[in-house]
Structures are given as structure tokens and as C-alpha cells.
Image (cartoon, helix red, strand yellow):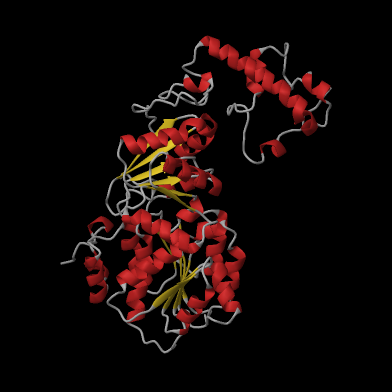
Amino acid sequence: MLQKLKTVEEMSFKDLNLSENLMKAIADAGYENPTAVQAKSIPIVLSGKDLLAGAQTGTGKTAAFTLPILHMLSNSNNNLKSKPRCLVLVPTRELAVQVEESVKMYGKYLPLKSTSVFGGMSIVPQIKALRRNVDILVATPGRLLDHAGQRTVDLSGIQILVLDEADRMLDMGFIVDIKKIIALLPKQRQNLLFSATFSEKIKSLSEFVLRNPAFVQGEKQNSASELVDQSVHMVSQKLKSHLLSHLIKHHKWEQVLIFTRTKNGANRLADKLAADGISATAIHGNKSQPARIKALNQFKNGSVTALVATDVASRGIDIDRLPYVVNFELPNAAEDYVHRIGRTGRAGSSGRAVSLVDREEMRFLKEIERFIKREIPRVMFDSFVPPANINIAAEEKTVSHNNYDGQFKGRPRTAQRKTSRGRQSRFNAGAERGFSNDLNISANTAKSFKPSGFTGTQSSKKPLNSYRFGNSKRQNFSKNSFSNSKSAKVK
């Protein structure tokens, strides 16, 4: 009688035919059942086929390639002496450290050695580590090429190549380095490519690297974990840091990861939180690697409550039970939002993702909601009182938090009239300050400039509102919006 095959949801690690030593390490880590990407990927990797896998952060993708690679290398003869047999390329230092930690954790009962090489640290200790028998090498592209140039690493024995978070590596401009590294590898090898998204660049890279690959999709590309409770606070940019301090103190958050867009912004926010009596530190690309490791360790062990990070530096921040993630500023790309909030709600634990959104960020919020195919609930402030010395414009105070769509809803008519007049003044002032230069006309001509279809006087509100900057229904604010539009004609 035929035995019914188990579904991915029904599978356990025992069904994946991994070695006893690996199963013991998995049990020590407290895992019983594989995630979807692990259950789908591990048998394919064990079969020796190339693999193209779509996996969001927090789905267990590191173990999806680490476990089968450890199994295969431990069961094969090593006649390569000190040459690495597996190369894992990653985009950032933090992710390199994380992947090597996973290799050591799962391979602690196996006679295999690993090391990681990345920039921001002295190259001398890395050279010494590479002189030992290294089976698995985890590296960032730039530092690996430094070693190859100094002939301190021999890549001629690589049997397995892994490109982890390949989409981020391409975003960071590593495509040339990746191709240089691949040229140093043996042609006969197994290739594994993991990516959260599948752009045309990723498809092109996969065609260049992979040979007849199997395809695996873990979580959907545009899906966020159901274990993450998402919410939005509509708040002026001026009040964001004050509201964040209030949320941390009022709700007694003990561990919160906060995202900003810029390095300087991360530093300023960490200083502001510290001034408010909240232990905080920043982590970004300008920090030295020892400082970044120290900050991350302080955050993990609980000695620091708030870790303020940029998107690039966040790669590799892997905490199983991180309870809170805050988007102090929304990312420009919707995919990065999914990656950010994926830092919580991991390993079966629930989490909360809070976004502080200024009205100027509404277009980013709308793009995110379209990408994840759901509306993120707007939440009113909980017992928050803005500081008396902060001057907030009237329109920002009267915006309806539960019915905000980028327009001027929930506002007294007097405020609407003032705002229209304000737009009129800003339009005229903009013409005098430089709008005329963009159109190659004089300032006086710009004052009387009427867009096509314009009827009536300048004081007419409807045409002015239709052509004002910020009206998403009429004005597309993509990078190419002005270059693609028809040039203005002045009669």
C-alpha cells in the first residue's frame, strides 16, 4: 500500500534525512519543524542540483542552505587540504557574522571549520584564519577580492557557491565584483541563489550563475508575516522623536529596533533617546566593525533598549524573539518595508511593527500597502501630549488619523482657506526663487504663467490645487516624472 506523502506543513526535520550530528544540533537549538523554504530547499540541495530560492528575511533561509551543505561536506572526503570547499557571498558584514554563527551552531558536532572575511576589520587575523583548514568561507565581495589579489585565499577548490540576499548585493553595486569572483571559481560546482525579490537584474544574474536550477518560493515576495501586528501613527516629522520616546516609556518596551533612512539621522535619534533617559545606540556603515559588533551585542543582551539602524546595517540583525520594530521613517522601496518588519515575528514568536508617518511620506505608505496588498491600520496616539515648545502647523494638528488619504480632510473650513492661500504664496515664491529657471523663462513671466487648460485668474483655487506640488492624483513624483512629462509651452 502506498504511503501518503507529507505536505510541507506536516514535515519535520526527521523527514529530511539529515545526519545524526546535525539533528542533535537542531534539537539543541530548539527547532522541531522546518519552515516552508527549509522543507522545500533542503532536499533539492542534497540532490546536488542548482537552486533559485525566493525567501524573505525571518523565514529560515540561512538554515535552508547551511544544513544541507554541512551534511554533504561532512560525508565527503576532503582532499583539498586548506582550500575552502564552500563559498557563501553576502552583502554586509553583519550578515557574514550571522551566517558563520549559524554554520558553527549547526555544525558544532561536525569536524568542519569555517571563517568569515569582511571589510572594516584588520585583514591580518583573516589571513591567519585562511591559512588553517577552512571548509566553509563566508565573505563580502570586496574583502574577498582583496584576499584574492594578495593571494591569501585559494578558491580553486570551491564545490558549492551560495549567493545570499542576492538582490541586496545587486542594489549595493556588487555585480562587477560577483562576476570577478565567479571567474576565479571552478566551472564544475553547485550554485545556490537566495533572493527576497526577483527583479530583471536578479533574473539576469541567475541565468549567468545557475545551470538548470530548481525553483523554490518560501513566503510570497510581497507578504509580511502574519505573526507581525502592523500599525501606523500619523505624526508630524517634528514630533516623531517625542512620540517614540513616549511609546517606549509608556508601554515599557525593553527591546526595540528602529529604522532611519540616513546615518546622521540614526545618530541624532540615538542621542535624542539617550537624552530622554532611554538607553540607545546607533549602528550604520560609518561605524567601525568592532563598534557595530559591540552595539549589536549590547542590544541582544538587553543592556541597550533601542538600537537605531539604517537598512544596510540591519542586514544580519537576527534575533529570534525581537518584540518591536519601529519605522521612524518609511523606506523608499516597499520591499525594504517587508524586510524591516521581518526582523520581528520570527521563529514562531509574535511581534509588533509600528510606523511613524508624516504626511509627506504618504506616497511611500500607499506604495507599501499596494505591495503587501493590505491596508495598515492607523492608530490614534495613546495618552501622548506634544511638547508645548514645538510649533506645529495648524493643518498637521487637525488631520484625521483614521481617515487620512493625503488630502485635507477633517479640517475646519477656515484652515482650508488659509492653506489654499499658503499654497498660492508658495507657488509665487517658488517662481521667483528658481521655478523660472527650470522652465527657461523670466521670473516675471513665471508669475503670469498659466498651465495648459488653465482658465480664470491666479486666485482661482481649483486650478492651483490641481497643479500644486504634492497632489498625487495629478502629479507623479517618480524620479523620471519631470523628464517624461511634456515640456511646458509659454505663449
Q: Picture quarter containing residue 450? A: top right
Quadrant where the N terminus lies? Answer: bottom left
Query: Residue placed at 52% from the left, 29% from the top?
Result: 359
Up/down of 129 relative to 254, above or below: below
Residue 385 lies, in percent from the top left, at: 39, 25
Q: Visible in this render: residue 52?
A: no
Up/down of 337 relative to 319, above or below: above
Residue 466 lies, in percent from the top left, at: 64, 21
Front residue of 461/47: it is: 461
Q: Visible in this render: residue 178?
A: yes
Front residue of 461/415: it is: 415
Query: Residue placed at 53% from the left, 10% from the top?
Result: 413
Q: Picture quarter containing residue 68? A: bottom left
Up/down of 440 relative to 349, above or below: above
Residue 198 lies, in percent from the top left, at: 50, 54
Query: Residue placed at 36% from the left, 70% from the top?
Result: 103
Quadrant where the C terminus lies? Answer: top right
Looking at the image, residue 15 sits to the left or right of residue 253; the answer is left
